[in-house]
Amino acid sequence: MDNAKIAFFDSKPYDMEVFKTLNEKHGYEIRFYKNHLNIENSILANGFDVVCVFVNDSLDKEMIDILYGYGVKLVALRCAGFNNVDLKAAQGKLRVVRVPAYSPHAVAEYNAALILTLNRKIHRAYYRTRDLNFALSGLMGFDLFGKCAGIIGTGKIGKVLVRILKGFGMEVLLFDKYPDEAFALEAGARYVGLDEIFRGSDIISLNCPLTKETEYMINAATIDMMKKGVMLINTGRGKLINTKDLIEGLKDGKIGSAGLDVYEEEGNYFYEDHSDRLLPDDVLARLLTFNNVIITSHQGFFTREALTNIATTTLDNIKEYFLNPEKEKYPNEVCYKCQ
Ligand code: NAI
């Protein structure tokens, strides 16, 4: 089906550029909408075969029923995570495909960038020297060499990160629900229990998906177990961390620094310019006051290579569906029964 109609939500100029170019060989009719998909604007999907969405477009049961009623057949996620889709509600109504990997290097390198920036306080030094303040007080970091990093989630991104951190000469502890012992052996790292990650790590990095099990895995109790001054990095999903507990940990110095590319309420803010408005979120406002916290708006994936891979796989996923709409399972499909 070459003339499939795609309603593309949360589109940014950079998405449009790469999708338009790569769609030349597919010839799909793509309508780009700037806004997130929400109940009020869901009518925009009426008559489309495919709804193409990103990380902060929420497809709960109500939305799925609406889209199904409009004749939408396929949800094409432009991301790896699918926590924003109610797969149970989608069962038998909409097929859901995603981009399982677009560049683990992009995110893992970004993790490393957050670690280096926070540790050596480059974000603060940058502003100081601009103000002709060349003093070093307050900017002291620590050698990564010989320190211990704990990686929670050793999938595609976690594994690349482990190799990067081993390159710095760090000891690396691993935790995963499904450990890959062969990888650990080859990388010179070792799987341990979560407790040991929390108690033994100087840097903890969250690289697992958001699930019922992992939601708020960083909370007052687990922060209490951590080394004083620990660095916490989260490029996974915001809700892996109970942000209010994190703030308490930062206030009492237990958390030495935090690099957050995701935030539990990010859907209200990230990817948009809010600079001419007041910030109504007091928790985010408090987080932004700490000079040992770096918050970025879910940009870990944002490299040229990753964007190209996202567009290529998304369009291929759509093609795969229309080649055989009755196929039992598509390679990049996510569904309630098969997870
Ligand atoms: P992946 O699916 O390759 O790896 C995830 C790993 O987490 C797997 O090894 C899995 O066994 C493990 N896991 C699952 N449940 C777990 C649990 N309860 N405890 C510990 N480990 C568990 O995924 P990938 O590509 O490495 O991505 C990881 C996460 O990074 C994604 O789920 C997504 O939320 C986030 N992400 C963030 C991006 C950003 O721009 N900040 C971009 C891409 C992904």
Image (tube, helix red, strand yellow):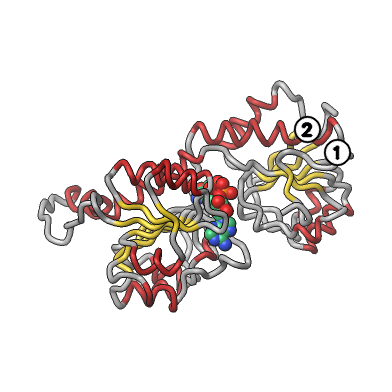
Residue at 77% x, 29% y is: 28
The mark lying in front, picked from 2 and 1, is 1
Residue at 65% x, 29% y is: 20
Nearer-the-camera pick, 277 or 248: 248
- Tell me the kind of residue under disc 1: Lys
Per the rendering, the mark at residue 231 is none
Nearer-the-camera pick, 84 or 34: 84
Pointer 1 residue:
327
- Can you name the residue that lies furthest to the top here? 25
Residue at 41% x, 72% y is: 246
Choose top left, top right, bottom left or bottom right for residue 339: bottom right
Q: Are marks 2 and 1 in contact (CB under 8 Å)?
A: yes
Which percent across, then down, holds residue 178?
Answer: 57, 55
Which percent across, then down, holds residue 62?
Answer: 80, 63
Within 10 angstroms of label 2, few (less than 14), some, or many (20 or more) residues?
some
Pointer 2 residue:
320
